[in-house]
């Protein structure tokens, strides 16, 4: 479907689910961006879930978001169980504004919901020539190292930096072998998942997506990945006042209450310590790209390059809508 037509349709669906026009547009744009960057697991496949959560009153469509200024650099936001996109949009804008004014912007958000792709928010800061760290916690998916029960989310780590080119450096990665959204999409369409990414509930390796969802996902790099997931749970949940320690509810399966997710945004001016950051980052990337390449590798890519390429290509095309999503949209609009 043509992007703008789709954006209008999704905005209309969110308005029908009681969001203000402004907030509905924020959500529609974030979902369409996920499709454009080639992350459909965080795009329209989640639309029905967000609407179901609003209908079940575990997302507040008309939140009274409290923004508390702690200093010129630091803001604490209570999202009042808003849809994550709206809270995160306010958060990143605050962090950018503070960073421009003081050099650094730190925003902690509590009582929020799933906000989609961390990179979407990092990109907004990088476009203003700022460096960004973005953290969020997520529902239990990974067993902490040494445990047999999942507790940590796939808790993405996201770091963005200007590169002095049009293509930003955006490292945006789950700390699980694959992100949970991909497993959900596979489960919905009856597909298998790769080997080595999940165990079933009995602790046996599985490629069955449904069994993986009821079992545990494996962290990247063993105990190191488990440690990173824990760090993000502390930064996003313990530090901000959000849910933590396995208390974030699964947005698809648990409608007994709001998720109360925490997010943390840290945004910095890139020239805080050196005047020539732009030259230095260019030189840094050049040195790495010039290295001898492994067999079959045409170009050493920096994180974010592949996504940018996909975005540019997809921008010229209509957005492909799967059968399941088409069914969801028809139901939600009727
Ligand atoms: N909101 C949530 O609760 C939540 C939870 C988990 C993940 N997510 C989101 O899901 C998205 C996807 O996560 P993912 O773990 O599947 O990411 P991924 O595995 O697709 O990519 C991870 C990183 O590796 C980089 N990369 C990929 N191929 C590369 C290459 N050949 N050379 C150099 N760099 C390369 C990418 O640019 C990206 O920065 C992220 O945007 C993340 O924020 C959200």
Image (cartoon, grey):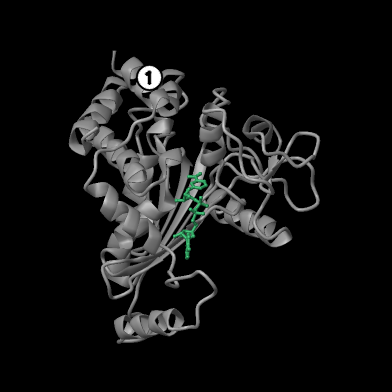
Residue tagged 1: 327
Q: Is residue 331 above or below residue 62?
A: above
Q: Residue furthest top?
A: 334
Q: Secondary structure at mark 1?
A: helix
Q: Is residue 45 above or below residue 152?
A: above
Task: Tell me which residue sits at (62%, 34%) in the image.
Answer: 209
Viewer-nearest residue: 235 or 279:
279
Residue at the farthest front position: 296
Looking at the image, can residue 286 be seen? yes
Residue 327, image x and y in percent?
37, 19
Can you say which quadrant of the picture contains the N terminus?
Answer: top left
* Res. 34 image quadrant: top left
The residue positioned 56% from the left and 41% from the top of the image is 180
Question: Where does residue 122 sit, x and y in percent of width and height?
Answer: 37, 58
Q: Quadrant of the C terminus?
A: top left
Residue 199 lies, in percent from the top left, at: 73, 41
| Label 1 Cα neighbours within 10 Å, binned few <14 / some 14-19 / many ≥20 | few
Q: Is residue 66 visible?
A: no
Of residues 85 and 225, the one drawn nearer to the viewer in this rendering: 225
x and y percentages locating residue 115 in the rendered image: 42, 42
Picture quarter containing residue 215? Answer: top right
Q: Is mark 1 within 8 Å of ligand 1?
A: no
145 or 194: nearer the viewer: 194
Q: Residue 96's quadrant in the figure?
A: bottom left
């Amino acid at each position: 479907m043509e992007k703008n037509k789709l954006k209008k349709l999704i905005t209309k669906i969110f308005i029908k689910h009681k969001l203000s026009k402004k907030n509905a547009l924020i959500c529609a744009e974030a979902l369409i961006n996920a499709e454009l960057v080639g992350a459909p697991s965080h795009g329209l496949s989640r639309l029905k879930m967000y609407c179901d959560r609003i209908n079940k009153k575990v997302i507040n469509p008309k939140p009274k978001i409290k923004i508390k200024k702690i200093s010129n650099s630091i803001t604490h936001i209570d999202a009042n169980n808003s849809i994550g996109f709206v809270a995160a949009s306010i958060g990143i804008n605050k962090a950018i504004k503070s960073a421009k004014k003081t050099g650094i912007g730190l925003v902690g958000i509590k009582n929020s919901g799933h906000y989609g792709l961390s990179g979407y928010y990092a990109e907004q800061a990088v476009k203003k020539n700022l460096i960004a760290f973005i953290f969020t916690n997520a529902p239990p998916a990974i067993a902490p190292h040494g445990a047999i029960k999942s507790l940590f989310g796939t808790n993405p780590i996201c770091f963005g930096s200007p590169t002095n080119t049009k293509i930003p450096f955006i490292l945006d990665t789950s700390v699980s072998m694959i992100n949970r959204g991909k497993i959900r999409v596979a489960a919905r369409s009856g597909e298998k998942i790769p080997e080595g990414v999940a165990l079933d509930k009995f602790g046996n390796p599985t490629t069955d997506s449904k069994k993986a969802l009821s079992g545990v996902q494996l962290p990247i790099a063993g105990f190191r990945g488990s440690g990173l997931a824990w760090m993000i749970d502390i930064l996003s949940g313990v530090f901000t006042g959000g849910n933590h320690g396995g208390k974030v509810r699964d947005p698809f399966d648990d409608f007994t209450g709001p998720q109360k997710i925490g997010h943390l945004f840290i945004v910095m001016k890139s020239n805080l310590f050196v005047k020539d950051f732009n030259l230095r980052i260019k030189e840094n990337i050049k040195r790495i790209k010039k290295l001898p390449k492994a067999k079959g590798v045409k170009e050493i890519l920096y994180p974010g390059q592949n996504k940018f390429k996909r975005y540019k290509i997809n921008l010229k095309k209509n957005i492909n809508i799967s059968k399941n999503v088409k069914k969801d949209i028809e139901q939600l609009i009727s």
